[in-house]
Amino acid sequence: MAARLPRNRGRAQPPADRRGDRLQPVISVRLASLLFLIVCGVSGCAGRPAKPAASPADYPVGYVERGYASWYGPGFHGNRTASGEVYDRHQFTAAHRTLPFGTVVQVRSLTNERRVTVRINDRGPFVRGRIIDLSWAAAQALAMAGPGTDQVELRVVGYQGRPGALGSFRVQVASFVEQATAQALAQRLKGTYPDVRIVTVELSSGRRYRVQVGQFTSERQAGQLARRLASQFDVEPFVIRD
């Protein structure tokens, strides 16, 4: 007859090796949590909003400009903008001559105090006295689609461009319908000024040939050349950014 083993009168305990098995997952989870917190603290957790790119020094957040706004869209819808994006008149975008692509600006109507926030993705307007060309949707938000223009204040509020992707400043001397006229002016300029080029653009009103001069890192230098060209050639040059 087999001997009877003594009954354990205390609280039942699992064997030592079983207790180790139960503790192992707890330790692993705690170690994983600690490593996660360390990594997040150093490099930022996945899913955390990316830090916005710093605004360019020459157009910092808070930069203000006043002038007239116009709008464009019906004949240009679906075409490529100067930034390479396809223009969509239903999006809140705008064209500016020198603000870097990706600059976010708030435009306030000085007529009715309405406001709209747009992103710069195109170049223009090339009309004296106008500072920004809004998309149709943005113009609707300011109630200026009917009148066509409005006096506004724009304020830089952010920047979504790629760091280091800022283009050079150039002077657009004139824009022509006839290619031969543009070539004639370019030849006159090449005798005195470097980096003369003709840029062909497709607009809703037809093809244009833009004569541009220079390549500057400073807008001030480009502005000096623009004033010199205005007096020499009886033109109305604009400083633009590539």
Image: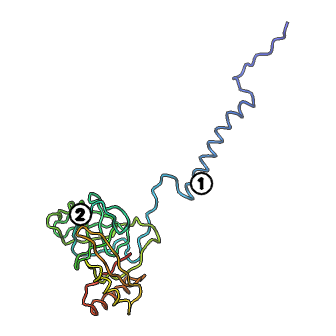
Amino acid carrying mark 2 in the image: Gly
From this viewpoint, which residue is outermost toward the top?
1
Residue bearing the label numbered 2: 75
- Of residues 107 and 96, which is closer to you in this image? 96
- Of residues 130 and 170, which is closer to you in this image? 170
> Percent position (x, y) of residue 214?
39, 84
Tell me the element at label 2.
Answer: loop
Q: Residue at x 38, y 80 (%)?
A: 169
Residue 151, above or below 27? below
Left or right of residue 157, residue 10 in this image: right
Residue bearing the label numbered 1: 38
* Quadrant of the image occupied by residue 173: bottom left
The quarter in which the N terminus is drawn is top right
Left or right of residue 152, residue 44 in this image: right
Q: Residue at x 31, y 78 (%)?
A: 210
Tell me the element at label 1.
Answer: helix
